[in-house]
Image: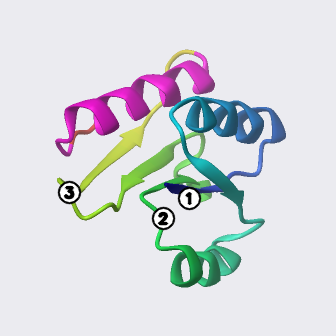
């Protein structure tokens, strides 16, 4: 299973990579959304985590594995990594599209 992370904050990037690896994903990091498109074509990832500079601290977590598609917009009122961990759990374990 492949996951792609596009995240400018190195602490969050590494933390999310650790969370995804613990769930069995092979993690690929793209330095930009433009570079991400090439990885999507090459890897057909099951999950993507994208920072969203236009929305400040928000991140998007996307499930692309062909099962129940879903997307979670993460609005970290608390620690961003904790919020992303929760979003990944809901999306991957619950399978439904939700907004946090």
Examine the residues drawn in magenta and state their main secondary structure. Answer: helix
Q: Is residue 86 left or right of residue 84?
A: left
| Quadrant that contains the C terminus | top left
Instruction: Classify residue 82 as left or right of residue 68.
Output: right
Return the residue at label 3: 67
Is residue 76 something that shows in the picture? no
User: For residue 36, what is the image quadrant?
Assistant: bottom right
Farthest top residue in view = 78
Residue 3, percent across and down?
A: 55, 55
Question: Any mark on residue 54, and which?
Answer: 1
- Give the residue drawn at x 63%, y 72%: 33
Label 3: few (<14), some or many (≥20) within 10 Å? few
Query: Quick check: is 90 in the magenta stretch?
Result: yes
Residue under numbered circle 2:
45
Q: Would you say residue 47 is visible in this rendering?
A: yes
Q: Earlier in the sequence, mark 3 or mark 2?
A: 2
Q: Secondary structure at mark 3?
A: loop
Label 1, label 2: how many angstroms apart (C-alpha)?
A: 24 Å
Image: magenta residue range: 79-97
Q: Is residue 42 left or right of residue 15?
A: left
What distance separates the C-alpha of mark 1 from that of mark 3?
A: 29 Å
User: Where residue 60 sits in the image (x, y, percent)?
Assistant: 45, 50
Alpha carbon separation for disc pair 3 and 2: 12 Å
Image disc number at residue 2: none
User: Which x, y percent locates residue 26?
Assistant: 62, 51
């Amino acid at each position: 299973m492949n996951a792609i992370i596009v995240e400018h904050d190195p602490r969050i990037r590494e933390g999310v990579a650790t969370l995804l690896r613990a769930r069995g994903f092979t993690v690929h990091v793209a330095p930009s959304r433009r570079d991400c498109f090439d990885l999507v074509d090459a890897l057909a990832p099951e999950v993507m985590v994208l920072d969203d500079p236009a929305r400040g601290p928000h991140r998007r977590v996307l499930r692309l594995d062909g099962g129940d598609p879903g997307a979670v917009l993460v609005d970290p009122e608390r620690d961003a990594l904790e919020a992303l961990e929760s979003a990944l759990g809901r999306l991957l374990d619950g399978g439904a599209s939700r907004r946090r």
